[in-house]
Image (cartoon, grey):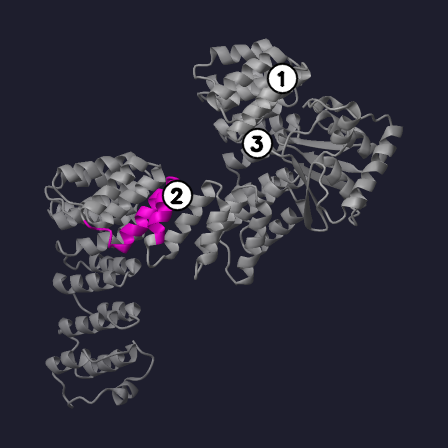
Amino acid sequence: MSSLPESTLLSLSPALPPNPTTATLATALSSATTTSHLKQFHAQILRSKLDHPNSLLLLKLALASCVLSPPSLDYALSVFARIPDPEPRLSNKLLREVSRRGDADKTLLVYGRMRREGSSVDRYSFPAVLKAAGKTQALEEGREIHGLATKMGFDSDPFVQTGLVRMYAGCGRILDGRLVFDKMSQRDVVAWSIMIDGYSQSRLFDNVFNLYEEMRNSGVEPDEMILSTILSACGRAGNLSCGKAIHDFVVENSLLADSRLRSALVAMYASCGSMDIAQELFDKMSSKNLVVSTAMISGYSKLGRLQDARLIFDQMVEKDLVSWSAMIAGYAESDWPQEALRLFNDMQLLGIRPDQITMLSVISACAHLGALDKANWMHIYADRNGFGGALPVSNALVDMYAKCGSLERAREVFEKMQRKNVISWTSMINACAMHGDAVNALSLFHRMKDKNVEPNSVTFVGVLYACSHTGLVEEGRNIFASMINEYNIAPKHEHYGCMVDLFGRANLLREALEVIETMPVAPNVIIWGSLMAACRIHGENELGEFAAKRLLELEPDHDGAHVVLSNIYAKERRWEDVGNMRKLMKDSGILKERGFSRIESNSEVHEFLMADRNHKQADQIYEKLDNIVSDLRLAGYAPNTSSVLVDLEEEEKKEVVLWHSEKLALSYGLISESKESCIRVVKNLRICEDCHTFMKLSSKVYGKEIVVRDRTRFHHFKEGICSCKDYW
């Protein structure tokens, strides 16, 4: 009720006869346009003593407040509370009206008041209330409603059954919904749609496709909503054949005019990676909405076609957070982390606040970039904007700091976490593993078990990786056995790859080969790649050639295997075979991945290629490199040209090895204005033997800690010693 006194309300009321009748007031109510007007009519009703026992007039007042723009649902409920023992038909009208306004909580409030006061309900009461229970995931209330409907004999009513299916699907209890669905004697397209959508939301895509076929066989034709749901499921499941069949059905039935279906088709093809078809459909759309444009961005990004994705992104007239996040994620997951961070800054300048999904992508970009200053800034930003307490964000921060070279900061975040799940423990174990700290990796593994956190298959990959990179062969054997015997986890290719790597690095190549020969699954690229890498380390050319050829049988375009074979032939001075291999690579369009190194200085990231002269300070960098080489020669350094496997003169080889990208990055780090005691370099390939020696001696001669992240791990160089103990 209004806080104004009744006399004031009456003075504000529209002109009415001194003693208005029920009919007069009911007619006048339809002219009300504001809550204030309704309260004036309410005052007239009270003054004329027409509120009791005339429930109908009060109900009309409550309903009128529901249809205002915007509706005044709180006022409607306060009026409804004044109706003594409302009849079911009156209550149902209010239930339906409140439900139509989309306020599920208030719908349940009306129903709750009816039940508490013993008001009667009938079959028409249930659909609106069940819909509200599903929307709010009020499973307990939904089950109570189900029980009441059964008690009253309405559980076989098709409208009540449809409501029950909707409620259970909304509450994530899709199997309970299916039990009701299977008992339905009449299933209209709405019931099928709810059930299919429920399976889709639960990611039970096989059930989606099977139920769709069952619906078609029952003679029920799908509508646009069902077809859109099926297309969405096809995209999420990567079921292109089913998606194409739906496309054919849409064309045959002349349904392409439906904008929702056109968008669903584009999104399905984009999700399945069929970007040519997606682009063709996209180009034909006269109006391109946010959803379909974002689907195109995500589709191109997944295929690494970031220029195509960016073109669509830049053409969008309006962009929401989802579209910004999709483009940022595309850059973050590819080798464009700096662009992801630039785009994140642009988004902030426009006043668009990130959500947790965006934050995870940006944190991933920082991790990929390996720039500690940017990582520190991102951590501060996450804390200041309320993301720091979120478990997924904390887990990502642990991973970020580890990949940016600061195991200490990763450990700080981990230890401060109020709650830890298996991902938290696994992230920290992986952090220790990639930094060569197997002792703490194993300690964490035992701690998590003591905390009754059960390791998963990913955890074991991290622990086995830690063992393999530090030569802990027996520990690795025991952990692999415990994974199978204690935790009943069936080894995957990744686990067998770790065991091959464990034995291979320890020069137990016969045992590594035995693992491959006794595996219950066929070895894949990971397995042969691990053996091939071990053979390269220990100079086992014959077995290395065998492993490389097996790998190429599985992946003919694998650049690493071609390079290894070429290097094996070069070591044996089989220059004709080297030439043939390189010609094969050229003719097949296979390019060796170019090595590059990044270094962060004064919050700016600099990138170098081998023999790179594009940097604005190139002359100073090469001058510094010459000085470093001179200083290191005094400490016993001599260039190791064994990694230069081309037919060059020895002096030419020395020049090549001295121009490796990580040496250029180090030289820049030593001439930059930054006075930090630690120089951090990120390299995309494995560090070579000569660069490893170069970094060790540089750390001793210049009194600097040097941290290098290569493709597989971190090397911490300090006072002439590397954390890997030369076991890498």
Q: Which residue is mark 3?
A: 591
Q: Is residue 168 above or below residue 550?
A: below
Q: Residues in magenta? A: 254-283
Depth check, mark 1 against mark 2: the one in front is: 1
Q: Position of residue 377 (x, y in %)?
A: 64, 51
Find numbered disc 2 in the image and state the secondary structure of the residue it sits on: helix
Can you say whether 697 is above or below 259 in the image? Answer: above
Question: Is 264 contained in the magenta span?
Answer: yes
**Mark earlier in primary sequence (1, 3):** 1
For the residues marked 2 and 3, what is the alpha-carbon distance in whole angstroms? Answer: 24 Å
Residue 478 visible, this orientation = no
Image coords of residue 332 (percent x, y): 54, 45
Measure the alpha-carbon separation of dots 1 and 2.
42 Å
- Ranked by sequence position, the earlier of labels 1 and 2 is 2
Q: Which amino acid does the dot numbered 1 rest on?
A: Glu
Q: Report the mark closest to the observer, 1 or 3.
A: 1
- In the rendered image, the quadrant that contains the C terminus is top right
Q: Residues within 10 Å of mark 2 (few under 14, many from 20)?
A: many
Q: Which residue is mark 1?
A: 576
Q: Mark 3: few, some, or many residues within 10 Å (few <14, many ≥20)?
A: some
Marks 2 and 1: in contact by CB < 8 Å?
no
Tags 2 and 3 touching, CB below 8 Å: no
Q: Residue furthest right?
A: 634
Q: Nearer the viewer, mark 2 or mark 3?
A: 3
Viewed as shown, does residue 302 lie left or right of 48? right
